[in-house]
Image (cartoon, coloured by chain):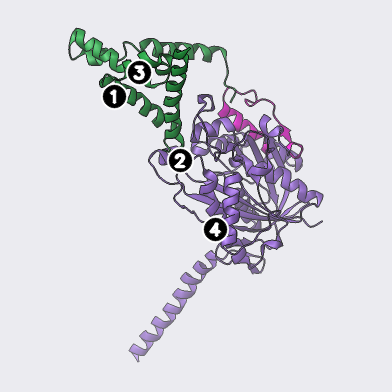
Chain colours: A green, B purple
């Protein structure tokens, strides 16, 4: 039960930051999303995002910050295996499932459904 | 003797040159309607012959059909797509239908129309140009963003008054899904909107002007200046446009030297709740007290309070369908005698906004009366 509680609090706090960026910072939705992704990447660079995932579980993996974390993770892992060029080739390694799924399911949805406007 | 003669010749030449070159130029600036000058004050045209709106056509989408003015519109669509493969094509279809409806109601045919004046919010005003392709009528494309409705009506009245045409068709259209995509985000994206944002009206309106006939008549029009108070938030267009509306309203009363009580109703185009309150405050500050029951906004009239439209309606279609549908009907019924419609437009582009430019705005006012 405690795991649910912390997932809710941490996930909620990340969303509060996003909402503040939109409402108070007057950033556009695209800017807000980019800021959160980059923050996740930077946090992982300092080795801080993994401990957050251990602590809050889905509260840290579901928000978009986790995408930045996964980008850095993939790049670092591949860099260890195949050297500097791995930073380039590995960047989408972990996230490729999410990106490919978005493209494929987006395409399938467009075949069968129409926008409601 | 020779010198005297030369001086005399030079004088005559100068006088003649003045007569030939300068006088016609002077006349260029004051177009004459009847015996009176049409230009009054700084930026207002007074139409002595009062061009008549002999017929109007209004077409709206499903959301507007659920609003309080549904009965005033000619065609109500239950399908946002209008059976078309894209929203852009649906917008063009609406404008075509509005024009056809107006032509039909006037008992005319397409070939009777001399000029079609139209504008919309799409890139390169495609809805207007493609409708002009269908109509096959001489066409002048306009862009005044959401002020296009009254820009077209004012210019149409000018064409009729100066006897440049017998029948002029003025139209404009907007579609919720196309305009939101063009200026904000595609509606499918589901982006959050603040309460100051507005809801683009899905609708098209057209009016036919003629020198005489039965119907509401256009008495004067005030052409607005571009006003930019530095607002750069496209989710708060009402606040950006309110100063432009106030500038044009102030100019209208100043040029004609009349008071607001001359009108039964003064309707701004699409300021919404936020912009409407700002405009009322600014007018009061300028010493123009307009009673709350006289000053209204088309963006507030078109939807019910419980419809989820944030601050109110916006878009070219907003002032067009409310004026050509609702307000013209009220004039015809005799509920209103004299109204002023001040269509407001935000002259931004998605690119200018991304490059952190502020939003320049404009408003054009047209005075319409119907004496039974």
Q: Are marks 2 and 4 on the same chain?
A: yes
Residue identifier under label 4: B247
The residue positioned farthest toward the front in the image shown: A2
Reply above or below: B62 against A74: below
- Residue B244 image label: none
Residue identifier under label 1: A42
Q: Nearer the viewer, mark 3 or mark 4?
A: 3
Disc count in the image? 4
Q: Is residue A55 left or right of residue B244?
A: left
Q: Residues within 10 Å of mark 2 (few under 14, many from 20)?
A: some
User: Is B85 covered by the magenta stretch?
Assistant: yes
Q: Is residue B260 left or right of residue A45?
A: right
Q: Is residue B239 left or right of residue B135?
A: left
CA gap between label 2 and label 4 equals 22 Å
**Residue B270 visible in the displayed image:** no
Residue B11 occupies which quadrant of the picture? bottom left
Residue identifier under label 3: A52
Residue B111 occupies which quadrant of the picture? top right
Residue identifier under label 2: B349
Contact between marks 1 and 3 (CB within 8 A): the answer is no
Q: Chain of mark 1?
A: A
Residue range in magenta is B70-99
User: Is A93 covered by the magenta stretch?
Assistant: no
At 46% across and 70% down in the image, what residue appears? B21
Q: Nearer the viewer, mark 1 or mark 2?
A: 1
């Amino acid at each position: 039960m405690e795991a649910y509680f912390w997932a809710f609090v941490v996930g909620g706090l990340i969303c509060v930051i996003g909402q503040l960026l939109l409402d108070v910072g007057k950033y556009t939705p695209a800017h807000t999303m980019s800021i959160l992704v980059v923050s996740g990447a930077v946090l992982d660079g300092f080795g801080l995002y993994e401990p957050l995932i251990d602590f809050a579980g889905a509260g840290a993996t579901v928000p978009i910050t986790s995408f930045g974390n996964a980008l850095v993770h993939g790049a670092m892992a591949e860099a260890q295996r195949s050297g500097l060029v791995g930073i380039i080739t590995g960047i989408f390694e972990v996230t490729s499932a999410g990106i490919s799924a978005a493209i494929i399911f987006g395409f399938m949805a467009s075949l069968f459904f129409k926008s409601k406007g | 003797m020779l010198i005297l003669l030369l001086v005399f010749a030079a004088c005559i030449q100068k006088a003649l040159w003045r007569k030939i070159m300068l006088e016609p130029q002077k006349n260029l600036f004051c177009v004459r309607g009847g015996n009176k000058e049409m230009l009054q004050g700084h930026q207002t045209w007074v139409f002595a012959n009062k061009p008549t709106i002999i017929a109007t056509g209004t077409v709206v989408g499903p959301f507007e059909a659920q609003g309080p003015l549904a009965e005033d519109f000619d065609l109500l669509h239950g399908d946002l797509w209008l059976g078309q493969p894209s929203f852009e094509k649906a917008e063009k279809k609406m404008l075509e239908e509005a024009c056809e409806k107006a032509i039909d109601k006037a008992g005319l045919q397409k070939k009777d129309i001399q000029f079609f004046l139209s504008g919309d919010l799409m890139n390169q005003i495609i809805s207007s140009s493609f409708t002009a392709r269908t109509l096959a009528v001489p066409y002048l494309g306009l862009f005044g963003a959401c002020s296009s409705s009254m820009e077209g009506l004012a210019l149409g009245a000018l064409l009729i008054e100066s006897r440049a045409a017998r029948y002029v068709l003025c139209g404009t259209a907007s579609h919720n899904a196309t305009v939101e995509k063009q200026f904000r985000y595609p509606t499918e994206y589901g982006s959050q909107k603040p309460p100051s944002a507005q809801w683009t009206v899905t609708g098209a309106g057209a009016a036919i002007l003629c020198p005489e006939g039965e119907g509401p008549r256009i008495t004067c029009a005030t052409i607005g200046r571009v006003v930019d108070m530095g607002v750069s938030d496209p989710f708060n267009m009402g606040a950006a446009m309110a100063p432009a509306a106030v500038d044009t309203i102030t100019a209208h009363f100043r040029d004609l030297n009349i008071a607001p009580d001359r009108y039964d109703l003064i309707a701004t185009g699409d300021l919404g709740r936020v912009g409407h309150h700002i405009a009322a405050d600014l007018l009061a500050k300028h010493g123009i007290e307009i009673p709350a029951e006289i000053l209204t906004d088309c963006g507030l009239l078109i939807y019910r309070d419980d419809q989820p439209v944030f601050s109110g309606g916006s878009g070219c279609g907003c002032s067009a369908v409310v004026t050509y549908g609702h307000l013209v009907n009220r004039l015809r019924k005799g509920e209103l005698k004299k109204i002023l419609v001040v269509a407001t437009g935000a002259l931004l582009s998605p690119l200018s906004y991304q490059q952190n430019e502020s939003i320049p705005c404009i408003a054009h006012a047209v005075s319409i009366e119907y004496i039974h």
